[in-house]
Image (spheres, coloured by chain):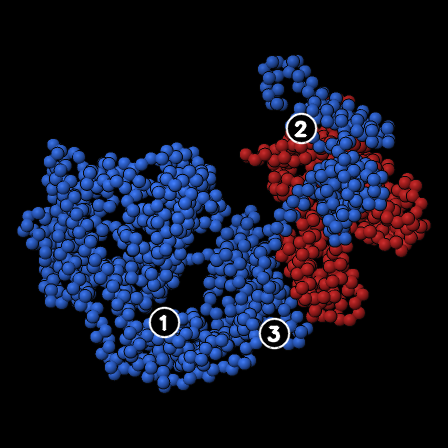
Chain colours: A blue, B red
């Protein structure tokens, strides 16, 4: 159907006017074009008026900018900023004018078409391209010039003294873990002691650096990022290609061996620092550096070429789109007598400038998908052969084994292009896509209603698109179920139903989820082809990101990409969003900004309880050189506020605290106990805070305080080497065990209370031990004969066989009966059970909710049993009598109701009866 | 065949063996025709409940002994609460700790229900019904507040008997509305008297005629008569002949705590803390109250330290009791008992390690 809202958007215009508006804002050049457009008469008055209204000074600058395109880019920013306020009111005016113009709809539609069709962007791009092109070859020129006189890394390295290679014989015999231990024991880097060195850009280009051992003042991550920042390649293992080793204390013996073997230059931290500060930019123009730079340029060039290609395609598309639009409007203009039929505008018809970057630069071809090439190939192979396989009844596995599956399950972390890949593959193979995602309700019944029928259908989309678009393939379609793991409790039975579809569908089905290890994804095992998407590496993303940056005229330092990739955990979507946001305010993204961005966009990854404890209890977190602030430590608690305190409590005993004072074993023991005492005291206090938070007072503002007392403070005392496996908290299990036993005890108390007249605690403390004895001993000592004794006691206390088992579970220490129960011979056990079941037993509890009769009936059974069992007949009689009196009592009550009702006025009686009922 | 402690429970006020003064006062109360609300308190195993039930029997006759357990259903908003009420034709017995925080609703509902139905048995001497509230110290503040007015408003139909170990958590308005009766633990000779009577009734002859046996039982049961009778019975069951030297069969949990105390005194290190933790978990899971564990452990250490000759024992004892009181308070305020018990045990270890 016709989308009216879109129609109005186009007609009235702030949206349609926007591209024009922005263009006017963005590039002063368009201003110069505007008059030309005006002359052509197709341009709306709005544009020309706005162009004329621009302050004269601006025009001046336009003239200047014609001389130098390079400068233009930068001036644009300034002018934009400066003129923003000035532009604003004018634009508002534009809108007003526009709306008025629109009012006679016939003319407006005609006008709206040229508005969008303003040729400026088309013209602009070729003009714009040239400066960038010029710029790139310029770069090495300008930078290599000073290099002629600068120092190369090779030259400087010669002057830096070799680091003393440690003697490997000492450490040779040690295992990996012993070495790790030694490394951990070695002095931690003292981070404050050295300023992070500053060097000229790209000064380490062309070098492959390996870091090993602990550097005295830089920790590993800092030093590595430092090296990458200045253009070096950092690898973990040594090879012949390694140009430099930075060696620290406790370096691995195998590495030292290799250094000697390959004769690689090894320097210490001082050497590394002087290298950074000494070498001039771009590696001082050395050969290796030049090569590396050349390689990078190659990459950049490729990206740029790609960008240009895409831009051309885009232009073509844009043209096509406009043509179509024009056609349609013309058609509708001619066909409609008045002004009714609005134009159908699909989102895909929107100009690119209005789209999000992630949409705008979404891959449209399979080659554009970053990473996961093999998976994409597999997917496309599967989809291509789907119908062939379908004919074969999914019996033929095919080359890659995909032929037996009717459905595919794509899993992987967010933002790496799973959905995109599915769409792109489907589109490129000519399938229509039907997508359902978490925004649709997908319960069993709805799936049945919506999808079941669909799965047997063919697509009609092509049919309506006219003949030229229709091709034979297009009656196929693929169903994409996105965010399958997002099927929530609202989607009753959806997962099961979907899995059922996977087995029988006659249309290809692509399921997408984030985490296939979830239990609710279990039904999809084996019925789907499992494709796990991996995070694309920086390498795979680089060219794509560079392309985007280039097309947006945004300077992006390739080294920054690595940083961004790391920050976002390889989430390409987020990187594009970051770039899009940054591009609003600046035109360049250098290394300096990257660190700021890294901080601001740091993806919050919640740690799992085990990792939290690993971090909290490790000595480095609390060492003086740790660069975790108190807040960072507290954030560990906030990663999981429920489990962290429990896990700390569970594991704080199993560390070798780094605060431990050295001395004799006895002193050490005392010192450790003292640390533990402080920690346990804090933990104990934290429980008081916790009960303020969780109980009636609900003082949640105390949560940070609780975090400090329960987790950070205790860890600060005991943090050190974790000596055993980190255990999961036992408290939960123990607590539920306690609940279970207290429930059992309650039950027992209810049953026995008539005889014992005691409460739960006393029942446990005084009765339990002796009850266990009396219920257990006879079975062992007297065997079969003991059974009747035991049953006698049980009946006396109204205990059932189940209670007997429960009572046996209650003992602790010497009376832990698990082992003792084996002393009862099996025949005795079975005889006991049989005998117990063969008798009737008194019951003490019956529900008042039941009718009096049934309750009384039960009681009668109980009493007759009493008569049989009890040897004191008179007592039984007494019981009976009293029971009768009790029954009488009940009956009296009953009678009273009725009698009262009859005697008194009817209305009253009714109300009374009601009240009593 | 029930345990001796239940079998030989006195049924009437006359049968009670000790605290004659209290028995007499209760008797005169029962016969006076008026009967105030009672607050009966005292340590466990002193005979509170027995006295109260005997008093009720004095008032209402043997009918009070005909007990049954009813499952009553109360509605708290949309939730249905089920809990058991022991009742006879003349009285109800409830235990608020069963109701875990819902005791206010139960008290309001049940008491009103009971109070609003009048007995039409005109032959009865007393026209009121009695509600016994066990473990009254665990009544929440809300429930106690709900009791206040009910006690006055329905006093025509309803008498309350509150039973508790300590009155410290009972709010003053309730204290002022009740007659408070303290039932202290029996003395060792009084207990011996009871023991003798029981042995006579059971016609048991296997006990040596040595008063120190009874004294020993009384000491080991901490003058809890119920526990004492249990001990006596288990002695009889497990031994052919009982002399002064026959070892006592202590309740399971006591043995565990005793062992723990001895071990702490011997080994003070991290492994010990670990094993203490699992012991504590075991005790707590098996429904041994944490406060009891704490106090028993402290007493055990106190006792064991008496045998220690070296070191500054007095100071150690002082510090341990200090720690015990600190963590006892925390046990009341906190929720995760194990945290506090562990805190106590490590603290104790440090104290011992420093001073021994």
Residue drawn at the location 24% of the way across and 46% of the way down: A348
Q: Which mark is residue A233?
A: 1
Residue A44 visible in the snapshot: yes
Q: Quadrant of the C terminus of chain A?
A: top right
x, y percent for residue A447 = 40, 36
Distance from label 2 to label 3 (Cα)? 68 Å
x, y percent for residue A684 = 61, 58
Decide: few, some or many residues near mark 1? Use Cα within 10 Å; few <14, some 14-19, many ≥20.
Answer: some
- Foreground residue among A247 and B237: A247
- Foreground residue among B22 and A402: A402
Please report contact status of discs 1 and 3: CB closer than 8 Å, yes or no: no
Q: Earlier in the sequence, mark 1 or mark 2?
A: 1
Q: Earlier in the sequence, mark 2 or mark 3?
A: 3
Residue drawn at the location 66% of the way across and 40% of the way down: B98
Chain containing mark 2: A
Decide: few, some or many residues near mark 3? Use Cα within 10 Å; few <14, some 14-19, many ≥20.
Answer: few
Q: Which residue is mark 2?
A: A848
x, y percent for residue A33 = 10, 56
Q: Earlier in the sequence, mark 1 or mark 3?
A: 1
B104 is higher (above) or lower (below) than A854: below
Q: Which residue is mark 3?
A: A661
A461 is higher (above) or lower (below) than A895: below
SS for dot 2 = loop
Q: Nearer the viewer, mark 1 or mark 3?
A: 1
Distance from label 1 to label 2 (Cα)? 82 Å
């Amino acid at each position: 159907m016709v989308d009216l809202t879109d129609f109005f958007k186009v007609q009235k215009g702030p949206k349609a006017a926007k591209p024009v508006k922005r263009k006017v804002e963005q590039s002063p050049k368009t201003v110069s074009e505007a008059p030309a457009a005006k002359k052509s008469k197709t341009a709306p008055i709005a544009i020309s008026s706005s162009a004329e209204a621009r302050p004269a000074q601006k025009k001046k600058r336009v003239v200047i900018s014609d001389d130098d395109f390079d400068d233009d880019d930068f001036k644009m920013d300034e002018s934009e900023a400066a003129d923003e306020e000035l532009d604003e009111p004018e634009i508002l005016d534009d809108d007003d004018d526009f709306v008025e113009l629109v009012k006679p709809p016939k003319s407006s539609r005609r006008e709206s078409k040229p508005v969008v069709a303003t040729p400026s962007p088309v013209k602009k791009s070729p003009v714009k391209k040239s400066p960038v092109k010029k710029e790139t070859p310029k770069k090495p020129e300008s930078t290599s010039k000073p290099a002629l006189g600068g120092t190369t890394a090779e030259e400087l390295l010669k002057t830096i003294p070799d680091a003393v290679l440690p003697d490997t014989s000492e450490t040779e015999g040690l295992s990996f873990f012993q070495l790790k231990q030694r490394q951990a024991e070695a002095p931690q880097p003292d981070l404050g002691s050295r300023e992070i060195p500053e060097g000229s850009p790209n000064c380490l280009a062309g070098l492959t650096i390996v870091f090993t051992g602990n550097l005295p003042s830089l920790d590993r991550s800092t030093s590595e990022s430092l090296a990458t920042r200045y253009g070096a390649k950092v690898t973990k293992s040594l090879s012949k290609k390694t140009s430099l080793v930075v060696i620290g204390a406790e370096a691995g013996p195998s590495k030292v061996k290799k250094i000697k073997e390959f004769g690689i230059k090894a320097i210490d931290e001082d050497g590394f620092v002087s290298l950074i500060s000494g070498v001039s930019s771009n590696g001082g123009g050395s050969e290796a550096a030049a090569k590396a730079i050349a390689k990078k340029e190659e990459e950049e060039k490729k990206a740029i070429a790609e960008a240009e290609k895409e831009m051309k395609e885009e232009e073509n598309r844009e043209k096509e789109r406009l043509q179509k639009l024009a056609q349609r409007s013309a058609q509708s203009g001619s066909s409609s007598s008045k002004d009714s039929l609005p134009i159908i505008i699909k989102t895909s018809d929107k100009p690119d400038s209005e789209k999000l970057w992630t949409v705008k630069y979404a891959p449209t071809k399979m080659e554009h998908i970053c990473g996961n090439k093999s998976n994409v190939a597999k997917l496309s192979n599967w989809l291509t052969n789907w119908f062939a396989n379908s004919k074969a009844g999914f019996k033929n596995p095919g080359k890659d084994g995909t032929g037996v599956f009717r459905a595919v399950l794509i899993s992987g972390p967010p933002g790496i292009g799973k959905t995109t890949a599915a769409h792109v593959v489907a589109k490129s193979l000519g399938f229509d896509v039907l997508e359902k995602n978490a925004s649709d309700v997908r319960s069993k019944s709805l799936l049945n209603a919506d999808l079941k029928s669909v799965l047997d259908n063919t697509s009609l989309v092509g049919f309506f698109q006219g003949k030229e678009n229709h091709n034979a393939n297009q009656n196929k379609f693929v169903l994409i179920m996105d965010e399958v793991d997002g099927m929530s409790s609202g989607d009753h039975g959806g997962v099961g139903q979907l899995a059922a579809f996977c087995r029988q569908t006659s249309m290809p089905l692509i399921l997408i989820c984030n985490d296939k290890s979830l239990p609710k994804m279990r039904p999809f095992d084996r019925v789907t082809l499992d494709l796990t998407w991996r995070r694309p590496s920086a390498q795979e993303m680089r060219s794509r990101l560079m392309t985007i940056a280039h097309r947006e005229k945004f300077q992006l330092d390739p080294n920054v990409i690595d940083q961004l990739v790391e920050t976002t955990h390889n989430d390409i979507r987020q990187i594009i969003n970051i770039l899009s946001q940054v591009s609003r305010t600046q035109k360049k993204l250098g290394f300096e900004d990257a660190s700021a961005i890294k901080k601001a966009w740091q993806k919050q990854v919640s740690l799992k309880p085990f990792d939290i404890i690993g971090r909290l209890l490790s000595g480095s977190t609390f060492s003086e050189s740790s660069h975790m602030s108190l807040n960072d430590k507290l954030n560990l608690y906030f990663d999981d506020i429920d489990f962290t305190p429990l896990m700390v409590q569970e594991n704080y005993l199993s560390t070798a605290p780094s605060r431990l004072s050295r001395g004799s074993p006895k002193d050490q023991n005392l010192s450790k106990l003292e640390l533990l005492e402080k920690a346990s005291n804090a933990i104990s206090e934290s429980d008081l805070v916790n009960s303020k938070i969780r109980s009636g007072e609900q003082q949640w503002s105390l949560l940070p305080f609780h975090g400090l007392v329960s987790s950070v403070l205790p860890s600060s005392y005991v943090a050190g080497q974790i000596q055993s496996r980190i255990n999961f908290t036992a408290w939960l299990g123990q607590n539920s065990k306690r609940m279970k036993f207290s429930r059992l005890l309650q039950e027992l108390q209810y049953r026995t209370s008539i005889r014992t007249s005691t409460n739960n605690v006393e029942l446990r403390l005084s009765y339990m031990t002796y009850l266990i004895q009396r219920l257990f001993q006879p079975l062992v000592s007297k065997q079969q004969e003991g059974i009747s004794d035991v049953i006698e006691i049980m009946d006396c206390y109204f205990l059932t066989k189940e209670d007997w088992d429960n009572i046996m579970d209650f003992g602790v220490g010497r009376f832990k009966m698990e082992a003792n129960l084996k002393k009862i011979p099996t025949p005795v056990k079975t005889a006991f059970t049989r005998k117990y079941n063969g008798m009737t037993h008194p019951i003490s509890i019956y529900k008042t909710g039941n009718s009096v009769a049934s309750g009384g009936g039960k009681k009668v059974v109980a009493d007759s049993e009493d008569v049989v069992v009890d040897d004191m007949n008179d007592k039984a009689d007494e019981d009976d009598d009293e029971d009768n009196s009790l029954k009488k009592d009940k009956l009296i009550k009953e009678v009273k109701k009725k009698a009262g009702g009859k005697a008194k006025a009817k209305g009253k009686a009714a109300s009374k009866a009601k009240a009593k009922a | 065949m029930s345990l001796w402690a239940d079998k030989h429970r006195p049924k009437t006020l006359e049968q009670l063996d000790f605290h004659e003064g209290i028995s007499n006062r209760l008797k005169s109360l029962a016969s006076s025709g008026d009967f105030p609300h009672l607050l009966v308190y005292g340590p466990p195993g002193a005979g509170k409940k027995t006295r109260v039930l005997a008093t009720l029997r004095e008032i209402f006759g043997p009918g009070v002994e005909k007990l049954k357990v009813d499952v009553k259903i109360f509605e708290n908003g949309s939730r249905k609460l089920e809990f058991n009420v022991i009742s006879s034709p003349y009285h109800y017995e409830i235990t608020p700790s069963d109701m875990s925080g819902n005791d206010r609703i139960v008290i309001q509902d049940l008491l009103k229900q009971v109070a609003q139905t009048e007995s039409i048995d005109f032959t009865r001497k007393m026209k009121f019904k009695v509600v016994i509230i066990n473990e009254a110290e665990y009544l929440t503040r809300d429930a106690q507040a709900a009791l206040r007015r009910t006690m006055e408003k329905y006093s025509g139909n309803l008498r309350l008997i509150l039973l508790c170990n300590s009155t410290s958590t009972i709010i003053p308005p309730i204290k002022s509305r009740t007659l408070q009766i303290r039932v202290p633990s029996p003395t060792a000779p009084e207990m011996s008297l009871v023991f003798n009577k029981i042995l006579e009734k059971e016609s048991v002859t296997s006990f040596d005629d040595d008063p120190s046996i009874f004294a020993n039982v009384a000491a080991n049961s901490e003058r809890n008569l119920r526990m004492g009778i249990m001990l006596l019975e288990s002695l009889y069951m497990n031994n052919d002949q009982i002399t002064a030297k026959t070892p006592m069969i202590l309740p399971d949990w006591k043995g565990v705590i005793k062992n723990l105390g001895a071990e702490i005194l011997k080994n003070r290190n991290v492994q010990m803390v670990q094993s203490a933790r699992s012991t504590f978990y075991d005790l707590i899971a098996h429904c041994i109250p944490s406060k009891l564990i704490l106090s028993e452990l402290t007493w055990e250490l106190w006792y064991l330290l008496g045998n220690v000759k070296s070191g500054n024992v007095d100071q150690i004892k002082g510090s341990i009791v200090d720690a015990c009181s600190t963590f006892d308070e925390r046990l009341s305020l906190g929720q995760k008992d194990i945290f506090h018990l562990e805190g106590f045990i490590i603290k104790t270890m440090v104290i011992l390690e420093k001073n021994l």
